[in-house]
Image: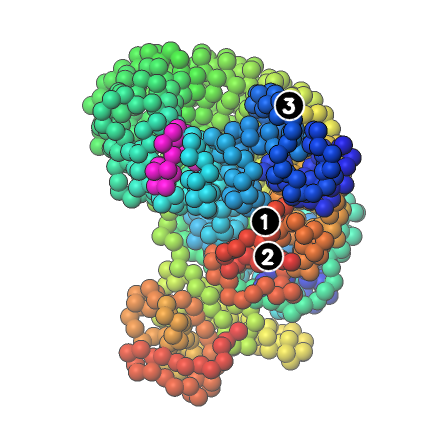
Amino acid sequence: MEKSLRNEVCPQLLDLISKEREWFVNRDGERRHGLPEEKKLELRLGPPGEDWCVKHNSKNNNQRERDESLLSLGYYSPMASRTHNNNNSNGCQTQMFAASSENPWNSPSVYQHNQQQTKAPSFLQFPSTPKSLPVMSQETPQPCCTKVVDLQSAEKKGFSPSSAKTAVPNSSQKRTAPAPVVGWPPIRSFRKNLASTSSSKPSPESQNAVPDKVVSQKPVETCSKGLFVKINMDGVPIGRKVDLKAYDSYEKLATAVDELFRGLLAAQRDSSAGGIQNKQEEEKEITGLLDGSGEYTLVYEDNEGDRMLVGDVPWHMFASTVKRLRVLKSSELSALSLGSSKQGKLQLDSPMR
Amino acid sequence: MREEMSKDDDRSPPLDLRGADIAESSSKTRNCAGITGSGSGTGTNPMEFQAPYPDQVLENVLENVLQFLTSRRDRNAASLVCKSWFRVEALTRSELFIGNCYSVSPKRATARFARIRAVSIKGRPRFADFNLMPPGWGAHFAPWVSAMTTAYPWLEKVYLKRMSVTDEDLVVLARSFPSFKELVLVCCDGFGTSGLSVVASKCRQLRVLDLIESEVSDDELDWIGSFPESGTTCLESLIFDCVECPINFEALERLVARSPYLKKLRLNRFVSIGQLYRLMIRAPQLTHLGTGSFNLAEGVGQNDQELDYVSAFAACKSLVCLSGFREISPDYLSAIYAVCANLTSLNLSYASINADQLKIVIFQCHKLQTFWVLDSICDEGLQAVAATCKDLRELRVFPIDAREDSEGPVSDVGIQAIAEGCRKLQSILYFCQRMTNAAVIAMSINCPDLEVFRLCIMGRHRPDHVTGEPMDEGFGAIVKNCKKLTRLAISGLLTDRAFSYIGKYGKLVRTLSVAFAGDSDMGLKYLLEGCSKLQKLEIRDSPFGDAALRSGLHHYYNMRFLWMSSCRLSPQGCQEIARALPRLVVEVIRDDGEGMTAESELHMDDTVDILYMYRSLEGPRENAPKFVTILQ
């Protein structure tokens, strides 16, 4: 599973950095354009624990997790997710990089490490057992009903000033929600609704201005839980997860699948080609998922275990029966028998990884 | 004789001769070779246990004496003296404590202890509370209740923590034990109001029904109405503040009216303040009150009810413990002023109030010993607490906004204030976003009675926000200066040095919680090699690997459990432990964030999501769920 990321060796940073820079420039203009060299420093000296913050994004798919934790996931955009699921050999570094860039509040601690020379060796203590990056399945956007709102509110919050004193601050250090982690802080779920039951929201200005009239309402129902299904793609060892509640049509799902896997697929091609990374040119849009016209086709497994073509039944029916998704090479589909249009069942001989 | 015992123990089930807390029901009967009972000559044959013993008088004396022994640790020690003491202790023990439900089987426990009246069983590991483990892991009450129906027909009390209890279990309980008096379910799940209903109606001797932080499903059954309708009840304690469904209030009112012995009543949030009033005037003898929502019922305007809450509270002259305030309307807070002076325990941890609102209350609570509160009161509120509550023993400050990037209205300032004001502090749980070593050090010096220090700096890896240093020195001071410290939870930016301190000075620490801390294997090694009393160790997201795990081989039999999640363990490393220590159950739990779906077996080149290992007399449990692999 994806966990062996933690055992990754830290490969050549130089390769990574150049890739990262392009990655960011390519994807999202509003993201930081901090100097890669500084990021490099961050990487090398980051505290060991940072590996895990991205990994634990995977846990956020856990439907048990309360929405309050998910609120800060609002930040966790598709862009971010792709950076986390970068190429095999760079998985570890990418995580660190992305993690530190998404967690500006971490930066100060990282900078502390800059000062403490002892930090460097500890980082390098990571066991050097290169492994192919295992399935890192869950770095997907995890929308919640309050996603957009919280993204903005998270960004508006002032960064804790006291810890940002030293060294080279991130040039455009916007306050952004760190990738949340399952079960952290260790508060039991029944204590987590408090921010919504009471009408007070903590904010820098109004800490002491809790309104007198607390709305006497029952605690807000947790957001309708996301419907997360795994999705794997032919030729890409890393699976992902999608929240079907975020979409209401097949077209939107297809677009999301394209976004999810486009980069991964390109990365796969890169690594298999063994060539110089040049992501910009390699990435192709994944089209025709639904109508069989593209290189890949979207299929799903339903609650009875049957494999079906995506798109045959009304969306809500699909959403209620789908258990997992797969993106198969269209060329392989033609070899398989398809069922009637009402229930387009596929019989596949070899189970997909 | 104790030296011979030691040698035997190497071959025998794990026991800690140093008297530390152990799985008390571990059985020694089969391995008492070499130990002679009083008066018998050849004690090498385990079968001799069943032979008639000559010295009846001595045994009778022993029985009469041992029955006064109540502490289970004392009893454990007594049971190790010799076979005779072992036998008599087993006969005279009336309270059975099982710290880990899988460390011993119900059959073995009931075989050794024949006259048990009260049973306590703990199940899941604590980190399961925070969704770190898929549901359905285990800890079922069913096999226990089933064994006890035959073994302990006179059972009176059951206390369960983090167990899965079904409605069927409750039915069995209610039907099988005519003397049943007390049921306490803490952090349990799996049952609903239908199970409660059966307990209420069938347990005629019921004195205590306490549901604490448990998940109770709403089967839409009126369980309060299931209590017998006529005659007075024996009820002394009824706690259901965690029950998240409405109750039949009229039935509750009638119940309270005919429960003259009721001392503890904690209502859930579906009881409005108006309804609270009606209950309070019927039960002025209450000592512990959970106020429910402490707000108007929906649809009730503020002017509709002009009830005299002040008098209602004033009438409760015995009230010492106040909690609830689940949906507090701070306007009503003034009603409790009359009782503040007598309060020893106040739980405002569901009440979002600010410093000013708190102050009026807290300035009157001079006798307060236990205080739970939300951080909405800010450092200023804590300063008020420090100024007034000189007798404070336990403080818990919960975050109103439990996210890593929340503002954090409390900080080192609050800790400093409490340290200086509440010198008798014994236990603290504190959630914050900013902390300094200086404040923690101050607490370590000012509060020498500290036994429990749990600091949660919610942002991971946060250093001292003034100096930028790791929090090593603060926690180091705590273990060094607080000589009574038995429980510790650490957070913030921590290097291996923090662990070296804990290993060096934390000689009494029994429970340790570690998250996102340490640099290398050395951290865990320091702990395992240094903390000789360590029994419960839970670690998450820290860079400890197989080598570190190995360094604890000498100690794992003395521990109740070790939990390590998202660390650097490999299945091989864990398997090494399993092979070296046959009496240890080594569970590798897969948690891919999806709950129960685990499609494949554990492969040796996977990484270990969760390692949960514990000593056990029973070996690998049967019926472990698919996401659990028990290594051997």
Q: Quadrant of residue B510?
A: top right
The mark lying in front, picked from 1 and 2, is 1
> What is the number of the mark on residue B630?
2
Looking at the picture, tell me which residue is in the foreground, A221 or B554.
Answer: B554
The mark lying in front, picked from 2 and 3, is 3
Residue type, mark 3 in image? Leu
Task: Tell me the distance, in whole angstroms, between the alpha carbons under discs 3 and 1.
Answer: 34 Å
For label 3, the SS is: helix
> What is the number of the mark on residue B618?
1
x%, y% of residue B225?
25, 32
Q: Which residue is depicted at the point 43% across and 64% down?
A: A229
Asked whether the residues under the numbered discs 2 and 3 touch, taking CB atoms below 8 Å apart as contact, a structural biologist would say no
Q: Which residue is depicted at the point 36% across and 70% down?
A: A304
Taking the view exactly as shown, the residue that stands out farthest to the left is B304
> What is the number of the mark on residue B58?
3
* Mark before the other along the chain sequence, 3 or 1: 3
* Mark before the other along the chain sequence, 2 or 3: 3
Chain containing mark 2: B
Magenta stretch: give its range.
B171-187
Label 3 crowd bin: few (<14), some (14–19), many (20+), radius 10 Å: few
> Magenta segment: does it hold A217?
no
